[in-house]
């Protein structure tokens, strides 16, 4: 028997209704803030992703890349930002260009709870403005989604990674600091100090932690413009009432970030997989993909992680009852066929039993369906009955079934 590939999963109804509800809330919030849906291919020329993360695990080790039948080297999207920037450059929409997406992402990782080879993100990207108030808008949008599903234990970690003016000097200082302690670093990072010194600071192993403990910090070396930007973002978050921790040790798994950078931690989850989402500014990314200087900022939130956090906090249960009404027909079946269609046309969520089963078996299906009401068609007439709780059967006129159902549903 075939199984879903390792690290992937199926989402069946009724659980999938939760997934749908989460996406609908996100789309509502994003739409109200002026973000439009962007749909882009699930795979891209491998170069699109290589440019944005040559020295990151996501691109170096975890990418699903392969040659297609035409000999093109392509990769399944490991992250969404590069795809959006590629689409922006191809179509050159006017800025500010604000888009949101809901999409599968693929990373060849060691699967465990909350870490999959195919996961799904909701995200936004806003291209054009360098305005720090846009950073506040973007962070607020993610925050509102957490609130909308009832999550209370989300911690926002925030930092600034500087820009072209201040980061190179910082990077040099960090490389010098870590280079002097190279022999003390873990096996994985000993040879990667020059390629990606920030990753060493993110390493959870003791040797790297020790070597990084007194390393220079970007936040202490921001240029005036970056410092002013970061101050304005913090003031904005305070003004909208979003709590945050400034965390100079925050390091993201992708290379393109500049200035404001953030992560949302679900404190109800195990620390290894508690990243519910993250994002930040990437003011140099459009240029690095061959476009004109265009600042940008966005985030991606893991749908599965959010739902796991909801389970852990006991909020946002699957919406109960996908159906309003279930038609049970022991009078020959035509009534079921016609009445079900009629109820659906009247805007009700209706289903029915099949294959001319016995009354008892049809009632069992009706109960299992989760519908609140049954419309029971017998040779003697039609009645409406409650299914999930006790109640009187109400005999109704065949022509008024939809009205009667609607009245009973309140
Ligand atoms: P990321 O932090 O790599 O950022 O991924 C965003 C979120 O996707 C994570 O915080 C996590 O919730 C979820 N996620 C990532 N990998 C997995 C996995 N293997 N299994 C389950 N969930 C996972 C990005 O991808 C950036 N593109 C975000 C961004 C948008 N930055 C700017 N704009």
Image (tube, rainbow, N blue to C red):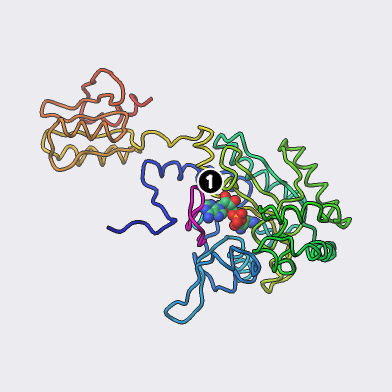
Give the residue displayed 27% in from the left and 34% down from the top: 368
170 horizontally vs 186: left or right: right
Outermost residue on the bottom side: it is 71
Q: Position of residue 328 (x, y in %)?
A: 19, 33
Give the residue displayed 77% in from the left and 42% down from the top: 236
388 horizontally vs 49: left or right: left
Mark 1 surroundings: few (<14), some (14-19) or many (≥20) residues within 10 A: many
Q: Quadrant of the N terminus?
A: bottom left
Residue 348 against residue 303 in the figure, above or below: above
Q: Secondary structure at mark 1?
A: helix
Q: What residue does disc 1 label?
A: 305
Q: Is mark 1 within 8 Å of ligand 1?
A: yes
Q: Position of residue 369 (x, y in %)?
A: 29, 36
Q: Position of residue 211 (x, y in %)?
A: 76, 56
Magenta stretch: give its range: 105-123
5 horizontally vs 43: left or right: left
């Amino acid at each position: 028997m075939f199984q879903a590939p390792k690290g992937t999963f199926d989402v069946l109804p009724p659980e999938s209704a939760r997934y749908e509800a989460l996406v609908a809330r996100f789309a509502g919030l994003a739409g109200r803030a002026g973000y439009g849906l962007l749909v882009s291919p699930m795979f891209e020329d491998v170069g699109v992703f290589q440019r944005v993360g040559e020295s990151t695990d996501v691109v170096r080790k975890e990418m699903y890349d392969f040659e297609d039948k035409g000999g093109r080297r392509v990769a399944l999207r490991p992250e969404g930002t590069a795809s959006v920037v590629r689409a922006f450059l191809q179509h050159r929409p006017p800025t500010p260009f604000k888009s949101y997406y809901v999409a599968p992402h693929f990373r060849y990782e060691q699967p465990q709870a909350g870490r999959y080879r195919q996961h799904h993100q909701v995200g936004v990207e806003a291209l054009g403005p360098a305005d720090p108030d846009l950073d506040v808008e973007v962070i607020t949008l993610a925050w509102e989604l957490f609130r909308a599903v009832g999550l209370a234990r989300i911690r926002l970690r925030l930092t600034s990674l500087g820009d072209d003016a201040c980061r190179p000097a910082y990077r040099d200082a960090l490389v010098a600091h870590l280079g002097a302690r190279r022999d003390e670093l873990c096996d994985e990072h000993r040879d990667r100090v020059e390629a990606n010194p920030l990753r060493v600071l993110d390493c959870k192993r003791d040797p790297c932690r020790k070597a990084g403990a007194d390393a220079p910090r970007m936040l202490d070396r921001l240029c005036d413009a970056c410092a002013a930007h970061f101050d304005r973002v913090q003031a904005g978050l305070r003004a909208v009432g979003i709590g945050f921790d400034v965390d100079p040790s925050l390091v993201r798994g992708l290379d393109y970030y500049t200035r404001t950078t953030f992560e949302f931690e679900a404190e109800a989850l195990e620390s290894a997989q508690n990243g519910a989402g993250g994002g930040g500014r990437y003011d140099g990314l459009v240029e690095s993909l061959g476009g004109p200087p265009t600042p940008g900022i966005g985030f991606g939130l893991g749908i599965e992680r959010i739902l796991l956090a909801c389970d852990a906090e006991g909020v946002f249960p699957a919406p109960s009852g996908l159906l309003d009404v279930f038609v049970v027909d022991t009078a020959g079946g035509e009534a079921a066929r016609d009445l079900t269609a009629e109820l659906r046309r009247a805007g009700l969520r209706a289903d029915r039993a099949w294959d001319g089963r016995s009354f008892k078996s049809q009632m069992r299906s009706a109960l299992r369906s989760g519908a609140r009401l049954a419309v029971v068609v017998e040779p003697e007439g039609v009645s409406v009955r409650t299914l999930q709780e006790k109640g009187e059967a109400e005999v109704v006129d065949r022509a008024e079934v939809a009205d009667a159902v609607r009245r009973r549903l309140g």
